[in-house]
Image (cartoon, coloured by chain):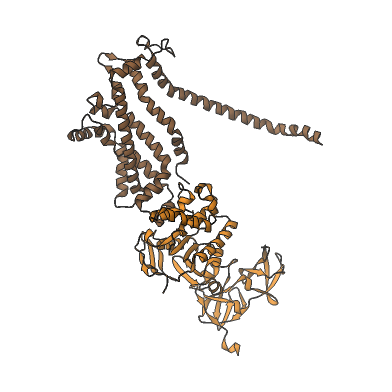
Amino acid sequence: MAYLSLKHLKKRYEGKQVLHGVDIDIAHRAFVVIVGPSGCGKSTLLRMIAGLEEVSEGSIALDGREIAGLDPADRGCAMVFQNYALYPHMTVRENIGYPLKLAGMPREERVRKVEEAARILDLGDYLDRRPAQLSGGQRQRVAMGRAIVREPKLFLFDEPLSNLDAKLRVTMRIEIKRLHRRLDATSIFVTHDQVEAMTLADLLVVMNAGRVEQIGTPTEIYGRPASTFVAGFLGAPAMNLIPAQAIDGQVRLDGAADIAFDLAAAAWGRVTLGIRPEDIELSPEGTPVKVDLVEELGGSRIAYAVLAGQEISIVLPRGATAMAGDILRIDLPKAALHLFDGDTGRRIEWSVPQALVA
Amino acid sequence: MTIDSAVSAPLRSMPAASPRARAKGKGRATTAIAHLVMVILSIFCLFPVYWMVVSSLRPPNEIYDTSLWPTGASLDNYAYALKAIPIVRMLGNTLVVSTVVTIAQLITGLLAAYAFARWRFRGDKFVYTLVALTWLVPFQVVMIPDYLLVSNLGLLDSLSALILPHLAGALAILMLAQAMRSFPREVIEAARMDGARSWRILWEVIMPNLRGTIASLAILVFISTWNEYFWPLLLSRSPENSVIQIGIQMFMTSEGTAWGPLMAASTMASLPILFIYIVLQRQVVQSFMKSGIR
């Protein structure tokens, strides 16, 4: 049985529907990342689990107990906010100890717990400072300290890293993951940053416009995106999506009828062909494309070119060089192709036609 | 090389420096004018206070004198004022009334402001507007009903009657509600997650962060209560149950006004206010500068 189970969760604000029935099951000790563009309802979903937003419809069960109607304090969740949300007038010690004080824990035990949390988070030297005297990273650690002392059943993270600079973000990301493992916790982490999502998640939930687009491990989702939205959202540079037609077991690109692939698609008609920039190969017999722009990333290079009237990006293999104006000969390996319905954008499973295999 | 650069440097900077210097001079002139205006304004504000103190030191025969400092300065007027009316008792009364009113308005204001700022209930905006409107209604309009009320309660000529109509004030509610609305929502949500209910959120999370607003509000309420004249004038009968503003007025009689003792009493009446302002000045300035916390 799932540890946290969300069933048909809906949210309406003054008649406007922002969540259209969300179902997610989360196992104990999982690190779940909810990712999506801003306004997709991911933060609302998290706040509903926390109890900060009312549930319009549906149920939330945590550890076998329905919590949808309960006060935030009674749910057993702790939350880390984007803006840290520390109490400005309290010292670090008081901030971390406040939930314990509210729970009526005796003073000695409280002191012990706060010190333990401070040790885990490396905050020992700052216990008597106020939030205003701390850096962004330290404040975020205090916010985490306040969450961990309560030993909650569920940790909720609402974009906790987006106020930090790039370097600190990477450090804190690793720290959060380490902390999660050390505490054997169950965590839900909301972000719009796909790198955070891919690196942190055991289970990734991709949301769009108030709906769950896909749930799976990062590898599954990256390897087999369920829709053009997921395909375009995860991965940098994003997957190339090229409009095409599926006719007679062949998929032809719209702008270039001579480029065709033998794919036995389940559907006929308009489709979208997808290929990741790093899956495109250079080959002497390949289709010629003219390079428009090259981005140097140090470790790799991304070439932008036009194929069938559509801009595509190609991750150049190590050692390969290209300049704007060059002609590259590229090959789209069939095994790396993704096929999506041209209207709904949903993934279409395809297989190589039997006749050709034989 | 060094000589060369040393010589050429001022030469090169000269043409660039002169317009800047002119701009600087202009800026200095503007600052000087601004300061001059402020000095004149502060003289306007301070001179009556100075005149009050000086007049209180003048002997009766010099009271209409226009010299800046009396020839025979003495504290006789103070001695007379202290003997003529129970000034210490009256100052004590005023202190009690002002303190109780200030504390009461802060408490009722915090409670009401929390409700307005944090809870959505049916008719909340309407009630808030009503509260705001009571601020616009002049005291003279509610004076008679208030008088009848305290008189029916049998409280005429008592300190309770002076306090009662001021237990809650629109200014306090509006100012605190405004401050609470600008308080970061996430901090309150964090407190809710930590297990705090409204009562503790108000007193342990919001209130300590509104100290600036509370201090300036307390000063405003305290001073306006201290200086109140009209309401005590309606209610007070005996000097023992009067506040200092009524005491001062007692020197204006049908036989004439005893200006010297009146000024002495006025000076004594303004000392506590002056003292409070000096002590809390930093808090007041701070509250205007911060206007919400980060």
Is residue B23 depicted above or below A275 in this figure? above
Is residue A291 depicted above or below B102 in this figure? below
Q: Position of residue B235 (x, y in %)?
A: 23, 28
Specify whether B227 is left or right of A320.
Answer: left
Can residue A85 be seen at all in this image of the molecule?
no
Specify whether B76 is left or right of A230.
Answer: left
Q: Nearer the viewer, residue A209 or A167?
A: A167
The N terminus of chain B is located in which quarter? top right
Can residue B8 be seen at all in this image of the molecule?
yes
Name which quarter of the figure residue B168 lies in. Answer: top left
Chain depicted in brown: B
Q: Nearer the viewer, residue B183 or A173?
A: A173
Determine the residue located farthest toward the right in the rendered image: B1
Q: Nearer the viewer, residue B248 or B66?
A: B248
Q: Position of residue A65 (x, y in %)?
A: 36, 68
Residue at left offset 25%, top offset 13%: B255
Give the colour in which the image draws chain A.
orange
Residue at left offset 58%, top offset 76%: A337
Is residue A193 depicted above or below A338 in this figure? above
Residue at left offset 43%, top offset 23%: B46
Q: Position of residue B78 (x, y in %)?
A: 35, 17
Specify whether A66 is left or right of A140.
Answer: left
Q: Position of residue B289 (x, y in %)?
A: 47, 39
Determine the residue located farthest toward the front in the rendered image: A108
Number of dots carrying numbers: 0
